[in-house]
Amino acid sequence: ADKKVIFSGIQPTGKPTLGNYLGAIKHWTSMQNEYDSIFCVVDMHAITVQQDPAELMKNTFNLLALYIACRLDPDKSTLFVQSHVPAHAELTWVLNTISYVGELSRMHQFKGKSQKHKENINMALMDYPVLMASDILLYKTNLVPVGQDQKQHIEICRNLAERFNSRYGQTFVVPEVYINKLGAKIYSLANPTEKMSKSDENEFAFVSMFDEPELIVKKFKRAVTDSGSEIAASKDKPGITNLLNIYSLFTNRTVKESEKHFAGAGYGKFKVEVADTVVEALKPIQAEQKRIAGDVAYMIKVLKEGAQKASAAAAKTLEEVYKKIGF
Ligand code: ADP
Ligand code: NA
């Protein structure tokens, strides 16, 4: 039987975080053998918030190199940059005609970002979920592996697929969200009830995949915890719980095992060991990322081949859509 299709992406805004790695990339890597896998660097999503053009280009390149450094294999998976495949924008226009202003204005992410970027509540910011639906639907995606924060966006994608299918006849696969419980939500180190995000203004709120060892240690040392001393996961200890979770994910232990490991240790010692664990885990990834990003000829080849593979698949769906709507 044909393999099921998975699609996912990350925005090249700032530096990718431990949240992007533990909630997304790490799972993609283990899924890529089992699924027909498509992973994108979503630069068109990134520009819904104002970006510096030179930074955006650099971030796009570095993020793609990170995908490969984390063992996403360009020979097994389709790795590409969103703006290199114009079908994403073209399908977005069509899906816009069946998307309601009301439903889009109610999205959590839109409401959050409108609060944060009051001076730039542009049309594309509100249209973000429609572009994301296009990303997913273009490839007849069955499963979308994402973190918890993206659940609502997959829901609207499903609604748009069903709406189009019922109006124009069976065209799109209605995708399922795939949220792996492990790493589904990594929290901010500064405010452990909010998700860790690379677009946080406070640099000490997140650890980036590209941070130097000293900075990683500094950030974990400064992580907000509570005034207690027990290293145990619980609702009223979100800071400690988050650190235990990060530690467990990097050491492939359960949270219970990690609690046992740290029994009797103080917060100070605990934080340093979590930091050291993350530093050691990131070292080989960082070295590999640098090596790959430095191999410009290789990167250009990956970019070109990825865009070709994605374009071929996307063109088929777009042609089908255009026929259905009378283009
Ligand atoms: P960010 O919110 O950091 O800007 P993106 O919006 O580009 O990241 O999200 C890319 C992927 O990473 C999505 O699948 C998202 O759910 C996942 N992700 C982002 N932050 C976290 C987090 N803190 N914990 C778990 N997954 C996350
Ligand atoms: Na996000």
Image (spheres, rainbow, N blue to C red):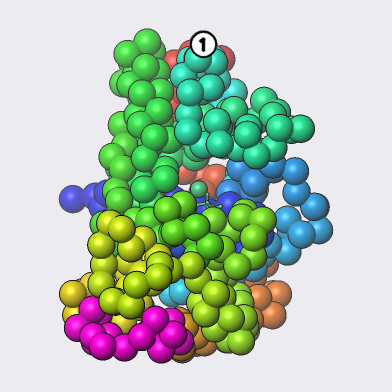
Specify the quadrant of the image occupied by residue 121: top right
Q: What residue is rendered at 40% in x and 23% in y?
A: 160
The image shows residue 135 at horizontal and vertical percentages of 49, 40
Residues 272 and 249: in front is: 272
Q: Quadrant of the C terminus?
A: top right
Indicate whether 136 appears above or below 197: above
Specify the quadrant of the image occupied by residue 128: top right
- Main SS, magenta residues: helix
- Residue 27: in sight, yes or no? no
Q: What residue is rendered at 47% in x and 33% in y?
A: 108
Q: Which residues are magenta?
A: 258-273
Amino acid type indicated by mark 1: Gly
Residues 264 and 311: in front is: 264
Residue sitting farthest toward the front: 227
Check if residue 269 falls in the magenta segment. Answer: yes
Indicate whether 273 appears above or below 35: below
Check if residue 160 falls in the magenta segment. Answer: no
Specify the quadrant of the image occupied by residue 112: top right
Q: What residue is rendered at 31% in x and 43% in y?
A: 177
- Residue 129: in sight, yes or no? yes
Q: What residue is rendered at 81% in x and 58% in y?
A: 54
Q: Secondary structure at mark 1?
A: loop
Residue on which the image places disc 1: 326
Indicate whether 251 appears above or below 34: below
